Image (spheres, rainbow, N blue to C red):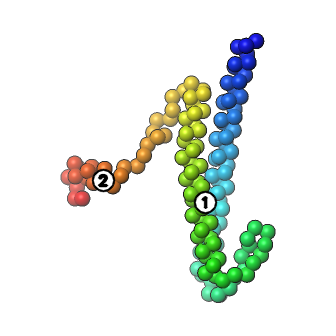
Amino acid sequence: MNEHQGTLKHLEEVETKASEILTDRQEIVALDKRRNDDRVGLRALQKESNDKIWITVGPLLVKMSSKKAEELLEEDQRECSTAINKLRSNLKIKVNELRDLELTPPFPGSTLQPMSNKEMAAMKQVLGQSV
């Protein structure tokens, strides 16, 4: 009976981690949609010539200056981008944890980091390109 409980506990851990991954992916999609809606709103604001516009803030409809509305949309875009980047970096860790629980090796390349400017300059120098 003890072996069955251990197996059940392991399966619960795997399912919990998989559920977290799926939830994070759904949240990334929702945040990306919100960020895209902000972008569309910004483009519409830039085409408008009015000083004051109507904007929805949650369930409210508010009249405010175009400049203030543009700042709010830009700030929301930045917050969405930050949240998406944080979720994506945590998602890589969670996927590797799930693969550890499943006793499979991590995805190759999932921990790659971009080269720094110094590293790129050194590579260009090695390849004979101008820096």
Q: Position of residue 15 (x, y in %)?
A: 69, 32
Q: Amino acid at mark 2?
A: Lys
Q: Which residue matches tag 2? A: 118
Residue drawn at point x = 60 percent, y = 74 percent? 71
Residue drawn at point x = 61 percent, y = 76 percent? 70
Quadrant location, the N terminus: top right
How many numbered marks are there?
2
In this rendering, the answer to whether 74 lies above or below 24 is: below
Asked whether, in this view, residue 15 is left or right of residue 113, the answer is right
Label 1 crowding class (10 Å Cα cut-off): few <14, some 14-19, many 20+?
many
From the viewer's side, name the closer residue of 3 and 42: 3
Q: Amino acid at mark 1?
A: Cys
Q: Position of residue 16 (x, y in %)?
A: 69, 34
Asked whether, in this view, residue 120 is left or right of residue 89, the answer is left
Residue drawn at point x = 55 percent, y = 53 percent? 85
| Mark earlier in primary sequence (1, 2) | 1
Q: Position of residue 77 (x, y in %)?
A: 59, 65
Disc 1/disc 2 C-alpha distance (Å): 30 Å
From the viewer's side, name the closer residue of 89 and 130: 89
Label 2 crowding class (10 Å Cα cut-off): few <14, some 14-19, many 20+?
few
Residue 40 appearing in the image: no
On residue 80, the disc is 1
Disc 2 secondary structure class: helix
In this rendering, the answer to whether 118 lies above or below 18 is: below
